[in-house]
Image (tube, rainbow, N blue to C red):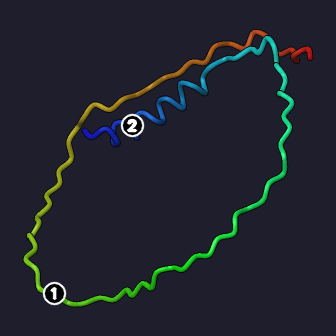
Amino acid sequence: MSLRKFMLACAPLAALTLAACDVDVEDPGEAPEVYVEPGRTPEVDVDPADVDVRTEERELTVPEVDIRTEERKVEVPNIDINPPEDDENEPIDE
């Protein structure tokens, strides 16, 4: 199994795991003060390429593929996630 297929298969599991967490925020924090000086966008002169798309007919040797299918019983993952109980529903003191 390639790494990309493995990552795509694990993404839903990771999302479910993160969604099943109970997080209690102790300190909400505060955003920093930031000063930004105004700027300007650069002047750009773009000369795009001239693209000519066309088709042409060629004779190629291609394989003939015969796909046979059958039904089989296989084991697939069955995941049960039980999120923790929410012990507090109080707002955070700011």
Mark 2 surroundings within 10 Å by alpha-carbon count, few (fewer than 14), some (14 through 19), many (20 or more): few
Q: Residue at x 75, y 9 (%)?
A: 87
Of marks 2 and 1, the one in the foreground: 1
Q: Nearer the viewer, residue 27 or 16?
A: 27
Quarter assignment of residue 22:
top right
Q: Which residue is mark 1?
A: 58
| Separation of marks 2 and 1 at Cα, in angstroms | 39 Å
Answer above or below: position of 75 versus 43.
Answer: above
Picture quarter with the C terminus: top right
- Given residues 51 and 65, the one toward you in this image is 51
Q: Tell me the kind of residue under disc 1.
A: Arg
- Residue 39 coordinates in the image, percent (x, y): 80, 54
- Location of residue 85 in the rendering, given as x and y in whole percent from the top left corner: 68, 13
SS under mark 2: helix
Q: In the picture provided, is 33 more to the left or to the right than 43? A: right
Circle 1 — which element? loop
The numbered dot on residue 42 is: none
User: Would you place residue 18 above or below residue 71 in this image?
Assistant: above
User: Looking at the rendering, which quadrant does residue 40 occupy?
Assistant: bottom right
Q: Crowdedness of circle 1 by 10 Å Cα count: few (<14), some, many (20+)?
A: few
Residue under the image location 62 percent in, 75 percent down: 45
Q: What kind of residue is marked 2?
A: Met
Please indicate whether residue 82 sits to the left or right of residue 68 in the image: right
Image coords of residue 54 (percent x, y): 33, 89
